[in-house]
Each structure stands twice: as C-alpha cells, then as structure tokens.
C-alpha cells in the first residue's frame, strides 16, 4: 500500500491526521536535518497502523515535505502472507 504524507518539521505541537484517502498531514517537532524528521514520520505512521517502523519505506520525497511511503500490505491489514 502507498500513502502520501505532507510534513511540516520543527513545530512545537506534533500531529498526524488523515487528509483524504491514503493522504495524511503531519507536523513533527524534529528538525529537517540529519534525517531526524523522516525518522519521526516513520514512527508516527507505524503508530497509526500499529506496525513496526521496519515495515515502512520512504519511496519518494526524502528531501521534500511531500513524501510517498510504502507500507507492507500484509502488515497494514493485520493478516499473514500466504505461503
């Protein structure tokens, strides 16, 4: 599954909310330096979907406020992959 996230780094009050179908808005207290804001976004997405951070990847937008993330479909749906 792919989701889009619009990020605002360096704010005092963090939030992560749905802005549409598979679109989210987020504000993180971490600055956009040293990949800190990106790591925090992955943590917030993992909390939202109740999955591990390792199951999420940034596909596009590493240096941009608009990001495309890939989430393991089996992890997000809570089902195990077929063997």
Image (cartoon, rainbow, N blue to C red):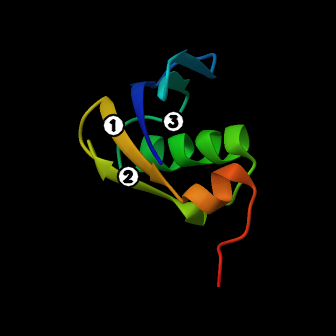
Residue 23 vertical position relative to residue 55 in the rendered view, above or below: above
Q: Nearer the viewer, residue 81 or 63?
A: 81
* Residue at mark 1: 67
Count neighbours of disc 1 (C-alpha within 10 A) and say few if under 14, some if 14 to 19, many if 20 or more.
many
Q: Position of residue 6 (x, y in %)?
A: 39, 24
Please tell me which of labels 1 and 3 falls first in the chain: 3
Separation (CA) of disc 2 from disc 1: 7 Å
* Residue at mark 2: 58
The residue depicted at 69 percent of the width and 37 percent of the height is 48
Contact flag, marks 1 and 3 (Cβ < 8 Å): no
Q: Position of residue 44 (x, y in %)?
A: 63, 39
Please tell me which of labels 2 and 1 falls first in the chain: 2
The residue depicted at 48 percent of the width and 29 percent of the height is 22
Q: Nearer the viewer, residue 65 or 23?
A: 23
Q: Secondary structure at mark 3?
A: loop
Q: Secondary structure at mark 2?
A: strand
Q: Quadrant of residue 51?
A: bottom right
Residue 63 vertical position relative to residue 23 in the rendered view, above or below: below
Separation (CA) of disc 3 from disc 2: 17 Å
The residue depicted at 42 percent of the width and 30 percent of the height is 5
Please tell me which of labels 3 and 2 falls first in the chain: 3
Count neighbours of disc 2 (C-alpha within 10 A) and say few if under 14, some if 14 to 19, many if 20 or more.
some
Count neighbours of disc 3 (C-alpha within 10 A) and say few if under 14, some if 14 to 19, many if 20 or more.
many
Contact flag, marks 2 and 1 (Cβ < 8 Å): yes
* Residue at mark 3: 30
Q: Nearer the viewer, residue 11 or 49?
A: 49
């Amino acid at each position: 599954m792919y989701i889009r996230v619009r990020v605002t780094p360096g704010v005092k009050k963090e939030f992560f909310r749905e802005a549409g179908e598979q679109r989210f808005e987020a504000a993180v207290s971490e600055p956009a330096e040293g990949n800190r804001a990106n790591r925090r976004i992955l943590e917030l997405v993992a909390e939202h979907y109740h999955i591990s951070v390792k199951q999420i990847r940034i596909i596009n937008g590493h240096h941009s406020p608009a990001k495309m993330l890939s989430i393991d479909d089996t992890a997000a749906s809570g089902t195990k992959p077929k063997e």
